[in-house]
Amino acid sequence: MRVPVPHPRAGRFLPTFTKAAGVALTLATLTAASAALSAPAGAPVLGYGYDPDREVDVELVLAVDISQSMDRDEQEVQRAGYIAAITSPEVLDAIRYGPTGRIAISYLEWGSAGEQFIVADWSVVSDAATAAAFAAKIAEAPLRHSQRTSISAALTQAATMVSSNEYEGLRKVIDMSGDGPNNQGGKVTQFRDKVIAAGITINGLPLMMKSERDAWQTMMNLDHYYEDCVIGGPGHFSIPVRSKTQFGDAIRMKLVLEIAGLAPGRAGVMKADARKPINCSLYD
């Protein structure tokens, strides 16, 4: 039986416990602690789901255009540019100095609505060795061609890859490169908006590498098309590539910015109200 007695210091009434009650409480506490310590390795711990092995600075999908307008020479330049960028000292430094010092990355080639090919599935890159291993998967894959250009389907596939992987990135990014507008698979802006609503940023790499002055990519302002119709989300940006020699530098800069969570200065970007907006549904 507990009898209230005055506490000598606080002037409050506190319950007193019999010695037997105190011993019972101590035994119960020790038994619970012993059970927790003796739980089998790997047993789930209720209320604590954090897994440090799943955490990365960014989940990054490299979504690469292989439509028919990309000739073999351009595809080889594109492949070589990504391989060189992923293994470059600049990109490795950007990874190393991130909060976790590691990223999850995948390489997707896309063309028509039903043609998306995962060339290099999700891998964790944290140093030169893991970067080289990932780049080797890209280098060893055969080149493919596809008839049409479905940015809509590519965005859907890339977003599915992000949502279904085993990693937890501080940021989620789709790096979309291409040399033409969406011409199959539905309205590109609808798919873009769904991806952004899922918390994924879309960055652009519009390829305007044709040598002819009247190339159709230049005539339709592909860089403006990407700005108005394709990219979006927190910190989104686009870097146009206007020559084959520029591609390597452009993709390296883009990867550094994406991994570091930065965006290029906007001073050189024309405001949307200073030019005529692109009709995003023109080719859908």
Image (cartoon, rainbow, N blue to C red):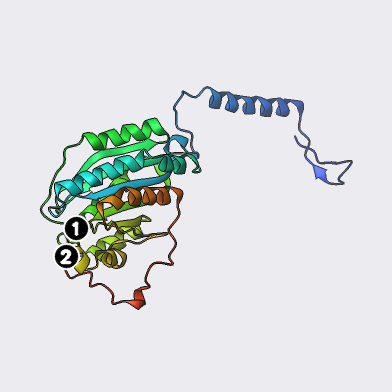
- Residue 264 x %, y %: 43, 58
- Camera-nearest residue between 64 and 117: 64
Q: Residue at x 28, y 77 (%)?
A: 276
Residue closer to the observer: 114 or 7: 114
Identify which residue, 149 or 54, lies in the foreground. Answer: 149
Kind of residue sitting beneath label 1: Lys
Mark positioned earlier in the residue sequence (2 or 1): 1
Q: Does the image show residue 62?
A: yes
Q: CA distance from mark 2 to mark 1?
A: 9 Å
Residue 150 drawn at (x, y percent): 18, 57
Query: Quick check: 93 left or right of 155?
Result: right
Rendered location of residue 215, percent (x, y): 17, 63
User: SS of the residue at dot 2?
Assistant: helix
Most distant residue in the left direction: 147
Hey, what amino acid is under mark 2?
Trp
Q: Residues within 10 Å of mark 2 (few under 14, many from 20)?
A: some
Q: Residue 34's quadrant in the figure?
A: top right
- 53 vs 120, left or right, is right
- Residue at point 19% right, 58% down? 211
Which residue is at 37% across, 41% downward?
104
In the picture, the quarter occupied by the C terminus is bottom left
Dots 2, 1 in contact, CB < 8 A: yes
Q: Quadrant of the N terminus?
A: top right
Judge left or right: residue 199 versus residue 29: left
Q: Which mark is residue 216?
A: 2
At mark 1, the secondary structure is loop
Residue 210: give its label: 1
Of residues 217 and 110, which is closer to you in this image? 217
